[in-house]
């Protein structure tokens, strides 16, 4: 069992020397946003960047929290969706910030999911040669993944996340109540990244998730339960530890890509559309990584089956054929896999597993073996 958290709200520290910061986690924390910012940067103004969906539910509460603490704030609201990680919207947000007379010591606040975190974080990395920013994630994926670790980016015509910067926030404030308005499908997709931390490096956490996932999903509807907060805290702690060891993804940080090479290829095959959300693609990708590892004799088939069963239990897809509609032919999928950034000197790099909680980076995976394996999986019904 994972040790339960003793305090609520919980704080997870990201240890990066003078760029260290706290991840505060708890239900209702949004109300403390202004006080926390005033304590960290006395006298600073703030510009909130958010999207239309999040603005509808949570912007006024965020603004009230800032006003209560005397933090002057303006807002920039963009359209929801990946399309906002574009040069056009990037320019619009930069210009909006400059027009609001933001100065070097002021702050950007990313209030939203991973799209807003990536966009606002990247804007913050360049406006006035770098502004501090605070992440207030509003999706489960952003809580446990994109808001932590300082990767920011927008998309290029050549691919996703190709223009960006490493820029760490000064605070991540996770109010788990914000997830109550998130569509269930988005929550479930984000859960794939939670399960990922167990599957890649923490078998005890994975067992805990097998026991407690219903309460994690229920959140505030399960009175007295802190399961959601615990799952988020353990996930953030896992990511923070990996980021502290390898901020710029030269080594260990690659483990976070468990399931992502297969997953990205499937996402690309679906045109990065609502047909397959990122977390859904990663659930399939992780299932394939476990199945492929078992086939190579790296772990017992029964253990791979157990990993996959949990993803199925929570309602995530685990097979390419769980995706509705036709998939491109095997050749095209192999091209998409080879295009993924985790290819070095012609060899495929995959994150494989020796068991639940025991992922490792394998740089020399034979493309022909992957092709044969994937061919079989596509033929399954
Ligand atoms: N920087 C990183 O390390 C990192 C890591 C993983 C993913 N990402 C990026 O994250 C992005 C995906 O993030 P995401 O899954 O959070 O998507 P998202 O930001 O598009 O949010 C998903 C949808 O939920 C809506 N939404 C967000 N919060 C809501 C709430 N509380 N209530 C109701 N609706 C809400 C949004 O408007 C959107 O329609 C991708 O662009 C991906 O590249 C970045
Ligand atoms: Zn991911």
Image (cartoon, rainbow, N blue to C red):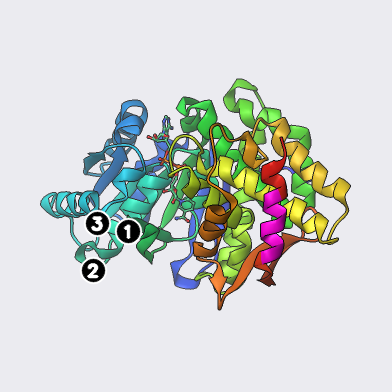
Locate residue 370 relative to residue 236 in the image: left or right: right
Q: Which residue is drawn at 44% across and 44% down?
A: 272
Q: Can residue 27 be seen in this view?
A: no
**Gap between marks 2 and 1 measured at Cα:** 11 Å
Task: Mark 1 and ligand 1: say if the CB distance to the nearest ligand atom is below 8 Å.
Answer: no
Q: Is mark 3 on a helix, strand or loop?
A: loop
**SS for dot 1:** helix
Which marked residue is nearer to the observer: mark 3 or mark 2? 2
Identify the residue at image location x=80%, y=48%.
Answer: 304
Residue on which the image places disc 2: 129
Left or right relative to 90: residue 309: right
Q: How crowded is mark 3: few (under 14 residues within 10 Å), some or many (20 or more)?
A: some
* Percent x, y of residue 25: 54, 43
Asked whether disc 2 touches disc 1, contact meaning CB atoms under 8 Å apart, the reply is no
Image height of 7 relative to 243, above or below: above
The residue that label 3 is drawn on is 106
- The secondary structure that dominates the magenta segment is helix
Q: For the residues marked 3 and 2, what is the alpha-carbon distance in whole angstroms?
A: 12 Å
Marking on residue 277:
none
Q: Looking at the rendered structure, which numbered label has been put on residue 122?
A: 1
Question: For the residues carrying marks 3 and 1, which lies nearer the camera in this image?
Answer: 1
Tell whether position 372 is magenta. Answer: yes
Task: Please state, as top left, top right, bottom left or bottom right, where the N terminus lies in the image.
Answer: top right
């Amino acid at each position: 069992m994972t040790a339960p958290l003793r305090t609520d709200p919980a704080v997870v520290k990201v240890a990066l020397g003078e760029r260290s910061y706290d991840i505060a986690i708890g239900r209702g924390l949004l109300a403390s946003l202004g006080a926390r910012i005033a304590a960290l940067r006395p006298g600073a103004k703030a510009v909130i960047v958010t999207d239309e969906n999040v603005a509808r539910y949570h912007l006024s509460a965020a603004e009230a929290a800032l006003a209560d603490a005397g933090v002057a704030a303006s807002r920039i609201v963009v359209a929801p969706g990946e399309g906002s990680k574009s040069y056009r919207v990037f320019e619009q947000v930069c210009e909006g910030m400059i027009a609001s007379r933001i100065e070097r010591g002021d702050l950007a606040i990313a209030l939203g999911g991973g799209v807003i975190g990536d966009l606002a974080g990247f804007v913050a990395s360049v406006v006035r040669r770098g502004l501090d920013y605070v992440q207030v994630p509003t999706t489960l994926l952003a809580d446990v993944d994109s808001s932590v670790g300082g990767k920011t980016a927008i998309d290029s015509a050549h691919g996703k996340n190709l223009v960006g910067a490493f820029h760490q926030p000064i605070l991540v404030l996770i109010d788990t109540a914000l997830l109550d308005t998130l569509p269930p499908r988005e929550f479930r997709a984000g859960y794939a990244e939670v399960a990922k931390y167990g599957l890649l490096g923490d078998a005890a956490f994975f067992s805990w998730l097998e026991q407690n996932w219903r309460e994690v999903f229920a959140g505030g509807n399960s009175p007295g339960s802190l399961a959601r907060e615990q799952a988020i805290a353990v996930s953030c702690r896992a990511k923070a530890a990996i980021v502290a060891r390898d901020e710029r993804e030269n080594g260990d940080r690659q483990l976070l890509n468990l399931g992502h090479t297969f997953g990205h290829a499937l996402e690309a095959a679906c045109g990065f559309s609502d047909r397959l959300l990122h977390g859904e693609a990663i659930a399939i990708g992780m299932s394939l990584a476990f199945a492929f590892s078992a086939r190579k004799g790296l772990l017992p088939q029964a253990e791979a089956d157990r990993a996959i069963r949990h993803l199925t239990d929570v309602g995530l897809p685990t097979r390419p054929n769980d995706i509705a509609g036709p998939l491109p032919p095997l050749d095209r999928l192999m091209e998409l896999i080879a295009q993924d950034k985790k290819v070095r000197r012609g060899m495929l790099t995959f994150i494989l597993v020796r068991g639940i909680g025991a992922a490792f980076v394998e740089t020399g995976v034979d493309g022909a073996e992957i092709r044969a394996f994937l061919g079989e999986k596509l033929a399954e019904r």
